[in-house]
Image (spheres, helix red, strand yellow):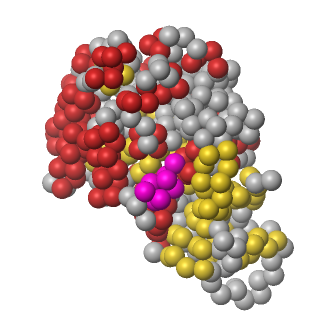
Amino acid sequence: MRIEIKNGRVIDPANEVDSSHSLFISDGKVVACGNVPSGFNADETIDAKGQIVCPGLVDLRAHLREPGEEHKGTIASETRAAARGGITTLSCPPNTYPIIDTPAVAELIQRHAEAAGFARVVPLGALTQKLEGRAITEMHALKKAGCVGVSNAMKPLGSTLIQRRAMEYAATHDLTVFIHAEDVALSDNGCVHEGAVGSRLGLPGIPIAAETVAVAATLALVEESGARVHFSMISSKRALQKIARAKFEGQPVTCDVSAHHLHLTEIDLLGFNSQCHVRPPLRTQRDMEGLRKGIADGVVAAICSDHQPHEADAKLAPFGATEAGISALETLLPLALRIVDDGVLSMTQMISSLTHQPAAILGVEAGTLSIGQRADICIFDPERYWMLDGYSMLSRGHNTPFLNWEMKGEVTRTLLGGKTVYECE
């Protein structure tokens, strides 16, 4: 297929492109931007007037639930939801069942994603066997099977010595270590931010120190091991300050924040709203503003969805007994666009945080419209309003505090390798 996308505003931050050009695709790859290539005759022409044409979005953290929890979601259902959100590449953590601690599981996930055909899935391998925090996995074999990094998901490691050895081993294989920064002794089975709201609700709290202590310990081990580390879902201003200092000193560290931490705070828990039960917890207004400033300053490299679909029953118990997480693939882009409307980021900066910057963290060829690159493309109307409701959601999980919100900015078409995998009706 030869495709021309015309009349759109093409934004490709990796190549510093932001102008009204036609984009030309042939055999699943970008062949030109601007002038018509010699001998090019389009089989299909897409009119993107009034819309933005950008690289397909790259999501650093999405739980797909398969294998092991298909009642919550499958690779097919969740990558279909990703396509609706303009996401063409996503990374899944290793806490599936079975765990991604062998090449066979990593290969299975990639095969199922390829068969579904909605988005590319790049798995993270387990840092320790069965995520038990004791024995290190065979990272070389996991890397050969397609794992782009290693993580212990949200499971604690047995000791800082084990963490150091695992980080040293990952460094020898040039694998990024993805860290969920939480000191489990300090979090002590909490479920909300430790503060006034949590006390008022009578719910056990997780102090900010649980995050900052874990960040500080990891940064000390980065100096010792030379490992490349990415902090997933930072939630507090103080932890971000420590990471900013480490980056200033030249340490090989990056971090991301989830889209919901940029819009929700502990105040949203009032009424025991279990849809706002997330981990790390929603923190204070000051923390939310600190995260926004971190994105504007470039300390935060990416915005992720932290997509965690659940069945309805998972959110119906008393708050502390409900399962944490939000179904978030379909709201990633509109929530990021709200940051633009709030004047925190420019449109180009926002798209950069969803495309080539997370792609660079994963070390994958994505997030750019460079000539010769795969034609993974997101076309969206930044001014179109739409309603997020349970009838239209494509994810199997409808657990989101944004249900029935009016969203601004809708994906009209998503292309994966030059093939349309989602088109707005």
Specify start and end residues of the magenta stretch as a single range: 335-342
* Residue that appears at 66% across and 71% down: 50
- The answer to whether residue 196 of the structure is visible from this angle is yes
Against 121, residue 338 (above or below) is below
Could you tell whether 128 is left or right of 404 in the image? left
x and y percentages locating residue 340 in the rendered image: 46, 59
- The answer to whether residue 5 of the structure is visible from this angle is no
Could you tell whether 206 is left or right of 18 in the image? left
**Residue 178 is inside the magenta segment:** no
Give 148 or 295, whichever is nearer the viewer. 295
Give 253 or 424, whichever is nearer the viewer. 424
* Residue that appears at 72% across and 89% down: 38
Question: Is the magenta region chiefly helix, strand or loop?
Answer: helix
Could you tell whether 393 is left or right of 234 in the image? right
Against 299, residue 347 (above or below) is below
Give 213 or 32, whichever is nearer the viewer. 213
x and y percentages locating residue 305 in the rendered image: 51, 41
Q: How many marks?
A: 0
Give 385 or 165, whichever is nearer the viewer. 385
Against 172, residue 58 (above or below) is below
Could you tell whether 109 is left or right of 123 in the image? right
x and y percentages locating residue 421 in the rendered image: 74, 52
Snapshot quadrant of residue 108: top right
x and y percentages locating residue 129 in the rendered image: 42, 22
Residue at the right extreme? 43
* Residue that appears at 16% across and 37% down: 220
Image quadrant for the N terminus? bottom right
* Residue that appears at 49% across and 53% down: 338
**Residue 339 is inside the magenta segment:** yes
